[in-house]
Amino acid sequence: MRRRTMLIGAAGMTAAAVAAPGHAAAASAPGDHRLAAPERAASDPGLAAPEPAVAATDPAARRVLLVGANPGVSLVTGDELRTFASVWIVRWSERGSGRAIVLWHDGRVRVLATDPDLGHWLSQYFTRNFPEVAGVPWPEPEVRRAEVHVTLDFATGLDARARDVRVRMTGVLHRRAFSTDEFDLAGTPHSLSLVLAPMNSARVWAGGRVLPGEVVLGGTPERPASSAFMTEAEVWRV
């Protein structure tokens, strides 16, 4: 497995430092490097594969795609990404509203969502194209309906639970705003704005055990970076 260190970069979002033969290196914001990949259908034939988006040339003319929050955590051991979790709170989107946890570990993708169709879309349209998981195996997601309980507090941290999966983050290091009109998802530029909080520590549980890996910290005292972060006021446009 290639080295993959995901940090909150100077631009205020996730930066990918990747060292691997034939693989692109780092960016200052999530979306500076995305791997374009063909759309995959969900294992449930009733869940349609996401359709590719077409971005408006003028960012001011782009339509709102999603409003909500998307905290994420990458846990690394040595040079290996071991666990990645993406927590979604969707207050409104073109595919509805709801909550989901997308979990990658051991080459397996699980999606636990209040709405399975929404969860599949979040996994395949957004999460699979994030730089944290660029280049790692991304098999057909196991999508399951579940109650997803999320407590997100910019003063204290995050606690998200669904079935046997739990994601916790503690220790807010900083709070800052970020926006870009060049966030690439599978070759299509998107506009993204949000408020970001890099976190000091995080753990992910599944199946009654703590999943492997540790949070990676970096940056500067004035602008700390972390492979675990919370977001709020997140708006995607295309």
Image (tube, grey):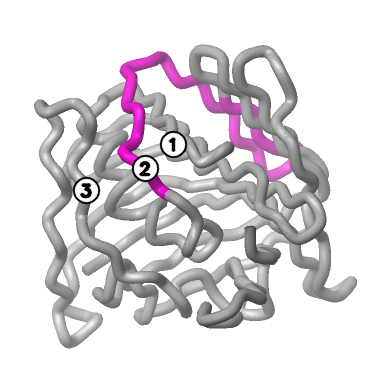
Q: Horizontal and vertical percent for residue 236?
A: 32, 61
The type of residue carrying mark 2 is Pro
First in sequence: mark 2 or mark 1?
Answer: 1
Which stretch appears magenta?
138-160
Please tell me how crowded label 3 is: few (under 14), some (14-19), or many (20+) other residues with Cα within 10 Å.
some
The type of residue carrying mark 1 is Val
Rendered residue at 52%/50% (across/down): 232
Residue named by callout 2: 139
Residue named by callout 3: 40
Q: Is residue 145 magenta?
A: yes
Disc 1, SS = strand
**Foreground label between 2 and 1:** 2
Quarter assignment of residue 166: top right
Q: Is residue 59 above or below residue 200?
A: below
First in sequence: mark 3 or mark 2?
Answer: 3
Task: Specify whether 158 is left or right of 76.
Answer: left
Task: Specify whether 116 is left or right of 55.
Answer: right
Please tell me how crowded label 2 is: few (under 14), some (14-19), or many (20+) other residues with Cα within 10 Å.
some
Rendered residue at 58%/27% (across/down): 160
